[in-house]
Image: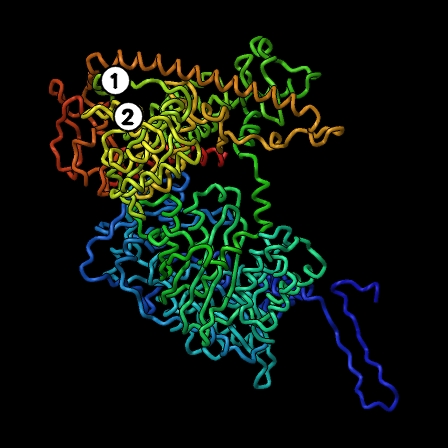
Amino acid sequence: MDSLKAGDLAEVVMLRPEGSSLELNSSSVMDPEVLEDERTSKRQTRYGAVILKDPSDPYYALLKEFSDVVSDDPPSVLPPDRGVRHEIDLVPGTKYCTTRQWPLPKEQVDVIDAFFTAKHAAGMVRESKSPHSSPTFCVRKPNGKWRMVHAFNKLNAATIPASTPIPRKDVLQNNMAGCTIFSALDMVDGYYQLLMRESDIPLTAVSTPSGMLWEWLVMPQGLSNAPATFNRLVTQFFRPMRQFVQTYFDDIFVLSRASEGKTAVEAHLGHLREVLLCMRENRLYANINKCIFGAEEIPFLGCFLGKDGVRADPEKVCAIAQWPVSVLQKDLRKWLGLANYLHKYSANYAEMARPLTNLLKKDAVWSWTSEAQQAFEAIKSSLQSAPILALPDEERPFSVVCDASDFAIGCALLQVDAEGRERVVSFQSRQLKAAEKNYPVHDKELLAMKYALVKFRVHLLGQKPFVIYTDHASLRTATSSPHLSQRMARWLSFFAEYNFTVEYKPGKQNVLADALSRRPDYELAHLAYLESPLYELIREAYAGDDDLAGLVEALSAPDKAVELTARQRSRLHRYSVVEGLLYYQVDGGDEPRIVVPNDEDLRHRVLYEAHDTPLSGHLGREKTYTSVARNFWWPHMYKWVRKYVQTCETCQRVKPAPSASAPLMSLPVPADCWRSVSMDFIFELPADARGHTGILVFVCRLSKMVRLAAVRKSVTAPQAAQLFVDNVFRHHGLPEAFVSDRDPRFVSHFWQHLFRLLGTRLDMSTADHPQTDGQTERVNRVLEDILRSVCAAEPTKWSALLPQVEFALNNAVHSSTGFTPFYVNGLRHPRTPLTLPPASNLGGGEANAEDPRGLKGLRTSVKRNLLSFIETGEAVRQRVRDAMAAAQDTQKEQSDRQGRKNTQVFKLGDQVLLNAKNLPTQAVSAVGSTKLRPRFVGPFTVIGVHGHAYTLDLPSSMATHPTFYALAIIRTSSSEGSWAGAGAGAGAGAGSGARAATRRASRASK
């Protein structure tokens, strides 16, 4: 017995004494995992493509005979009229369903044109003059091919749902009882085997990026009622064979048993022949690579069905069973919370879990004992038992919970049973891929929802409504929002096939999916991902740069003879290579910077991170350059930054044009950080989900650091005081002076009394000129510009981005001080995704073997370091004070002169931007508030010159006179793009992001 291993057959024999009445019995036991592998191996041999390689197989002759029906290359022809046509009944009062076609990469354009050329040759589509139109795009399949997608979202929204019943899974299972042999046929291009109702053909019109408009003569994919129509067709054909054929949409199941003197195989061959003859007569085709013939067990609508009955798919419980051992108390708490949720109706569960629950007590000492390990394994084993996964009841509604974390997504299919208990039908989770980890939080949550629909498609596809619970409230309107990301637009047609609503469920209540998406082994994999992928791209790009490749080779192998130019050799001492990254020291006292190769896509990606992201805030040329130059270097980098910022479409639309200013009165320069604080409100912003329409802005007048707090229009003086305590006092203490305008919230008796008690003084601004506090006014303008840039797609989400905007302001070099507010306050620069150090730089220093705790010389080293820190800080603050005084003198001199005027001259054909204040609000922004709408819109073409006035080529929808004075227009730095109407805000905000995304996509394809 010692030599036996998993998978071996063990013969166990019971011996009985002579004369005993006990019978002699024997049994064979096989390891469950090995048994599952054997079942899988048997199923693999029953696929049609495998059977055709074995002439001795009993199904070989049948498949050869019907090779025109079951093949990997079915014909593409217009189907006959079978009496069932797809009908589209619109809601009364519906007008035209039209969505503009968006531009696509050339590769997709070519694929789309080839697709419609083939379908036109087959007679399935024809050129159209329909007033309806839906766009077309492509989605990459796992096998690398393209899938054609039509965005029928407007048409589907206006379609009356079909009431055709779908097959009941439990009925299908009951009809298979007693059968011993099964086949599963997967129909190919099933939708294209159905004709459209003649009057509905114009509704299916789809546009292509090449300018064609096609309409479908057969049922296209993506229509909301298409599954019901197709199921009606298949049911009609195979209804006479329902004793041995079960159908579920495009899946056909053939089942047989031995009867009437025939073996099961003989009966099954006869049944299959009838099915294939019916398919041949009606020109229906199946994919031989996905069909299973004559198997003892087949995959059946999310489970496995065989001669012994129905069992759960092992992959559905794998997400729980493979949970690793918990090494931290918080990980055990997550896992046990999930187990409690699944086992709340299981007998003796509390006793089984007792060793683990004891570890979670308040004063318990964490020690993973053998008893805890046994309980952990016992619970994992019990999760795979039959009572865990409930058999779905098609008469009861389903619900789905889904959640996403930074490293994984999880979901579960739930249903309330007859006793009112919410039971799990199936649960799934997986780690995020490398690219998916970079998704915004909203898109990760949306990915979890899509993942759930894919995994539970067999249960959810149809017309019965169901609910998806998520802990991300914005997903409730994700499928109906007018502002869609490119990724969301690609998923629209997929979501359109399902009839669901999204409801908000906080993470604490969403325990099932929340735990599945936060498995500790997933999290560990995430935490190990410390290095930005940008560095690996830089390392790879060195090989394509002849100049830098030689430098890297020369520095990596000093003994090797490498040919370098004279200029490179003269500066070789400034270069160094660390972990494959080339560094360059610009000046002797500067930190070495990473050298970016001569790769346009890579350099633009760096600039995108330093300028376009919410953490960067679309700040100006100098601040963007300083942000990049802090860590990176390449020749003529300043020119690159200047050109990038100058041609940024978002900046051109939201930044103000140069204008005249009032005479400036400057306040005294503060002596230290947060000694003097200026305060102001920004109001008239779009209302967010909590009703906030304003921002309370606090600014340190020396360091220029800002603190931001979202407020309502009705904010009171006590509330403003509390915000000051929460955002300023707890971090920096009380200032000596406050600077504000005469807002009633600041001059109220509450504020004055509070400040008097605390020994502070309220310095009031000069009446009728709030620019006396020019610092806060300037911060307000920059803050509004950043919000316009980063919130263009979703203006009502501005409050959620306040932390990133605050970070961008505090991480940007201020023109008056020459330092970032972060550095003036703490003498350090914070890390960003762009400045995340290579993984090799993340470790700490080596420990001293003689003094591992560093106790020797503590007093001397601390004193020396403190003195250095104090001297450095005072030197920095003195430089700031001097710079501010000089800047105030310069600003006052310039401000007291005559205001600057826009003296630009334009000619016919020039591309210009138009000041949005000259246009009706509804023509510029779809949001009621005007605060975050773009300052400029366009570009438009100059079509008339009348002295200092110019006539622009405006669309008729703008309903305004097209001639404007020169001060109302500015020259655009790029001729790309076009005016798109009230949705241009979203386009403006996405412009730079799309620009960088396109470059990244082109780089990835190389």
Q: CA distance from mark 1 to mark 2?
A: 14 Å
Label 2: which secondary element: strand
Residue placed most toward the observer, 395 or 383: 383
Residue 651 visible to the viewer = no
Residue type indicated by callout 2: Asp
In percent of the image, x 36 and y 50: which residue is there?
Answer: 474
Residue type indicated by callout 1: Met
In percent of the image, x 78 and y 70: which residue is there?
Answer: 10
Quarter placement of the N terminus: bottom right
Residue 168 figure quarter? bottom left
Whether tag 1 and tag 2 are in contact, CB under 8 A, the answer is: no
Question: Relative to 428, does residue 440 appear above or below in the rendering?
Answer: above
Q: Which residue is mark 2?
A: 763
Q: Which mark is residue 665?
A: 1
Q: Nearer the N terminus, badge 1 or badge 2?
A: 1
Across and down, in percent, residue 661 comes to 22, 19
Across and down, in percent, residue 853 comes to 70, 32
In percent of the image, x 36 and y 70: which residue is there?
Answer: 232
Across and down, in percent, residue 381 comes to 64, 65
The single residue placed furthest to the right in the displayed view is 18
Residue 71 visible to the viewer = yes
Residue 375 figure quarter? bottom right
Nearer to us of marks 1 and 2 is 2
Across and down, in percent, residue 55 comes to 63, 65
